[in-house]
Image (spheres, coloured by chain):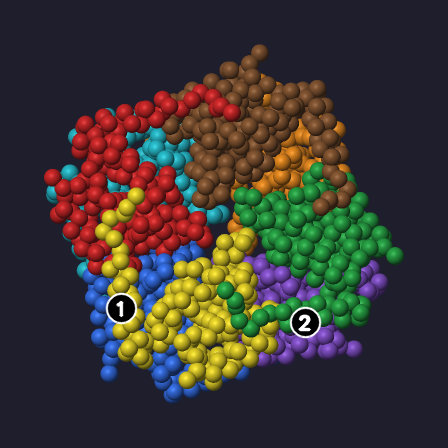
Chain colours: A brown, B orange, C green, D purple, E cyan, F yellow, G blue, H red
Amino acid sequence: MGAKVAIVMGSQSDWPTMQCASGVLEELGVEVDVRIVSAHRTPDRMNAFAKGAADEGITVIIAGAGGAAHLPGMIAAMTHLPVLGVPVQSKALSGMDSLLSIVQMPAGVPTGTLAIGEAGATNAGLLAASILATNDEALTDRLKAWRAARSEAVAERPVD
Amino acid sequence: MGAKVAIVMGSQSDWPTMQCASGVLEELGVEVDVRIVSAHRTPDRMNAFAKGAADEGITVIIAGAGGAAHLPGMIAAMTHLPVLGVPVQSKALSGMDSLLSIVQMPAGVPTGTLAIGEAGATNAGLLAASILATNDEALTDRLKAWRAARSEAVAERPVD
Amino acid sequence: MGAKVAIVMGSQSDWPTMQCASGVLEELGVEVDVRIVSAHRTPDRMNAFAKGAADEGITVIIAGAGGAAHLPGMIAAMTHLPVLGVPVQSKALSGMDSLLSIVQMPAGVPTGTLAIGEAGATNAGLLAASILATNDEALTDRLKAWRAARSEAVAERPVD
Amino acid sequence: MGAKVAIVMGSQSDWPTMQCASGVLEELGVEVDVRIVSAHRTPDRMNAFAKGAADEGITVIIAGAGGAAHLPGMIAAMTHLPVLGVPVQSKALSGMDSLLSIVQMPAGVPTGTLAIGEAGATNAGLLAASILATNDEALTDRLKAWRAARSEAVAERPVD
Amino acid sequence: MGAKVAIVMGSQSDWPTMQCASGVLEELGVEVDVRIVSAHRTPDRMNAFAKGAADEGITVIIAGAGGAAHLPGMIAAMTHLPVLGVPVQSKALSGMDSLLSIVQMPAGVPTGTLAIGEAGATNAGLLAASILATNDEALTDRLKAWRAARSEAVAERPVD
Amino acid sequence: MGAKVAIVMGSQSDWPTMQCASGVLEELGVEVDVRIVSAHRTPDRMNAFAKGAADEGITVIIAGAGGAAHLPGMIAAMTHLPVLGVPVQSKALSGMDSLLSIVQMPAGVPTGTLAIGEAGATNAGLLAASILATNDEALTDRLKAWRAARSEAVAERPVD
Amino acid sequence: MGAKVAIVMGSQSDWPTMQCASGVLEELGVEVDVRIVSAHRTPDRMNAFAKGAADEGITVIIAGAGGAAHLPGMIAAMTHLPVLGVPVQSKALSGMDSLLSIVQMPAGVPTGTLAIGEAGATNAGLLAASILATNDEALTDRLKAWRAARSEAVAERPVD
Amino acid sequence: MGAKVAIVMGSQSDWPTMQCASGVLEELGVEVDVRIVSAHRTPDRMNAFAKGAADEGITVIIAGAGGAAHLPGMIAAMTHLPVLGVPVQSKALSGMDSLLSIVQMPAGVPTGTLAIGEAGATNAGLLAASILATNDEALTDRLKAWRAARSEAVAERPVD
């Protein structure tokens, strides 16, 4: 069976951020397929990926990019699959450009956008898992357990 | 059978925005359940809704709110279901406060955030449909048709 | 007798900021109760804390959080006690997200918001003390003395 | 006995905003004293007001101003009473200037800041009431009732 | 001979802005070809346009879009022709989202970005003309005359 | 004869910035008087300074402060002398709060505001000198020479 | 005798803002010379104006412009006279672009910047008057009287 | 034959950014002429450069500056040649001031603006090359090859 969640990013420099997405999906036992797909440098690769993703057995796509971040929105333009966007923190504007480039999509082509940076990448993984879990009871149980474990790990009081 | 997509909002004043979500879901033949759930004025209602949503047969939750918009994130804290957030345009800051309050969630509790205002509400509906469609071929076909119709409706040239 | 001022924060990582609040309250001889209460990871703990605070003998609540900072506003939704919010400086957006998430509350549920970061935490402590001092002459005197000492410590001229 | 809550503002043009504060305090049966005190045009009046407020029997001060809004912070510099700040929505920058001028106070001189505009003014009134209520059981009851009534007024579903 | 400057935009709603570009090019006697090409609704049309533009005899491309404005950057990814971007003023964020989505391109794929809104569209036309003029003396003369006429039209003193 | 330009700042921590103002004034042979005057911690000192400055022989006042920077505007409220404001770079918001707190003064009470940080402090010194020079030919000559020397120091080409 | 204060602006459209500067100067009995000088459309006129201003008997220059507002800074680059800048409110970005373009000058070339829009224009007039008043006792008296009258006009309480 | 692309910058400190422009142009075999031209410190040099550029054989001008960045727009005011602007990252505001000062030009005087910082400088070089390539087939081929090489260099998958 093909991969369930594809994680794509615009360049190697996005990987330290995006591996938070693959990490949490692996913890949850979700199959991932990680690729570099640049909207600007490899538009044909992006087009082929986006149009073929459903047929490859991909169910959810996570796309991360920074600056004028067109990858999530352009993929969403070419597939009916759910697309989640991660704004990678940019150098000059700290990811505010990435965020607005990803989240402010016009009506008709949605990208479910997460927070800027690593927290957003982790959450993209979790949201992808929750989407898959809508049709997978075992994954639902693992997701609930993951969440419960994190809640239980919250200490009652801070330590110096 | 219970509702598939719940659309909740913080107040009546959010409805002109949020009905874009229910409108597109109805076009796509998806069952919706629309409610007012205020994080700040009815926290108990919110807690009961969020914790009970899965058992009510809800599969995806769309939550819209403006200003210090806590509704999407707080619901996401209390359910493993996918939660999508719509930043309602606010009076003073045009929805920038709504957007940051919804999208900048810490690692562990995701909200898939859409654009500020009506475009975002429409897209929340579409993204919810695409999530349901991961397990519903007929809906997938309707979603593809909806998208194709919109693409075909794009004129070749602008008119004065 | 129970504690007078509760200082709660979303995670251990907020403690370096929030200890400025506890520090100044201890200088002023005000009893404090410091806890980790995460809106997103421990919503039930938050609900129990907020609803029970008055009965625990707490008079003022200081809540600090960063990013999509929902803790102060959600506590304020569940108690009639005065709630003060401290926006913790966030990584990507330097606390602008924290600030807007805390201060832009809708009419009906106030959070008295202080500055981003350590200055805000110190001031949350001072404002809490001034609230308690409305009914405590000895604390009023200590607060006046604290303020006077700081004013007297201002040098006439800068030194290289 | 003197007034309990003073509401001061920089100019007549702030009154449409600030009357939300006096309105809610009057609903709650709290005595208010409303004045125009301009930091920039009447600094001596401001100084006299701030230094004399405690002796006038004032317990909490609400100050509203717009643009380079110095009134709340300057009053806070000259009284140990709790000072709450309301950022009035400004013409060019929609109150972002007002907000930052009020909330970003240095350590040592707190202003509890509310939201930009009318929501913030209403909430300043409510927060002032909650401060007075820390020592007034009857007011506590009225405040709880006011909050409960608002919660009960939230409809279950939006109407077109 | 084919058109020299293509003006493309994401939707009919961008036309009131973008006709400032075609207007000034027509004043300067430059042939224009105006089309609707939506990155998100008609990605295939966009790809075909961008890849075929040079062979169609187009020399410069002006692309206008609003919100998460991907059109200029995506076209630039698929052609070596000069691409100029016009950020259309958006509803919620006044075009700041459009601007950042267009201008913050990564190294390797440039879009020459003009001001938000009508001024930017006019200037895109002028910059396109100045590019064509690098190899067209007659156009250079017309451009110089257009500029001189505007300079001469500046009154010495304002009138009430 | 008394000092000509007073340089005041809110705290010792502003000195590394503000010494750029005193440095350039000393280069230009202008007498300076440097003091710490905190709007928030020493309001009485500020009031006395502002009201007495003209009688002390001060001709221009430079005031630097950060965050909710009230010093320049409050001094301007209490003197008819020209007041120049320097927004000191703040920790969380990089001086945007300082800038807006200083520059956005209401009609009636001006502060001539310079750039954030050291460039602004240097320029406050230069602007103060240019003000004094309106009535001092020798200073005019020194100012012209200072400017000419800087212009001459600009190299023709950058060096690696 | 030549004019004392020159008020220049980039275009006729700036006049409704800038006449607040001329209005207050006329109230104070200061001679003004009002001109349109566009940095971008009439650079030669600007250069001639800036270089000749001192010899024309001008003592202070007020320059207003919007958007990428280069007029104040470029004039300041070519004269040793004090230059005050007024950021005219722009359409898309409400004058934030105007403000940053004027105030963020590099070390060496100061522009004393006032608030965005009409308040800033009025204050530019007042600051220019205060500069002239450093060497004009009669103007000092008129300026003090103008200020005193405004202070006296502040009502004690707001009216509905 | 004279240089084809002039690269000018406001100061030596802009060179680490701007050499990305000269670097890519040299890779592409385009003749460059690099100079320091400060709008504020050397306005006469700027005027002479801008007015004489066409006669010097320059075809495209790249101008980089930071803060209140007036260089690109002022050069564009004095030449009909295409002018490209590079916003250099500034200390306090990370180049947002540079960007707005360059891009928000009024109708009539365009500057084609690239991204903040090094990416923008590289892209200014590429855009200048694409402009020259509109009339140079050999350069077109080199530009296409440069682009193709970069696309081919994109790895399929990220590496740890």
Q: Secondary structure at mark 1?
A: helix
Left or right, H103 with respect to C17, comes to left
Query: According to the image, label 2 marks what residue?
Result: C148
Residue G39 position in % (x across, y down): 27, 59
Cα separation, mark 2 vs mark 1, equals 48 Å
Query: According to the image, label 1 marks what residue?
Result: F145
**Residue drawn at 73 percent across, 78 percent down:** D55
Q: Is residue B26 above or below residue D74?
A: above
Q: Secondary structure at mark 2?
A: helix
**Residue drawn at 71 percent across, 38 percent down:** C41
Q: Looking at the image, which is closer to me, G129 or D129?
A: G129
Q: Does the rendering let one see residue F153?
A: yes
Q: Quadrant of residue H62?
A: top left
Residue E73 position in % (x across, y down): 37, 35
Q: Tell me which chain the residue with mark 2 is part of.
A: C
Residue B147 position in % (x across, y down): 48, 27
**Residue drawn at 56 percent across, 38 percent down:** A115
Residue at the farthest right position: C1
Q: Residues within 10 Å of mark 1 (few under 14, many from 20)?
A: few
Image quadrant for the N terminus of chain E?
A: top left
Residue at the farthest front position: C160
Q: Nearer the viewer, mark 2 or mark 1?
A: 1
Q: Quadrant of residue G58?
A: bottom left
Residue D44 position in % (x across, y down): 58, 80
The type of residue carrying mark 2 is Ala
Image quadrant for the C terminus of chain E?
A: bottom left
Q: Is residue B82 above or below residue C31?
A: above
The type of residue carrying mark 1 is Ala
Q: Looking at the image, which is closer to me, G97 or H43?
A: H43
Q: Looking at the image, which is closer to me, G158 or B146?
A: G158
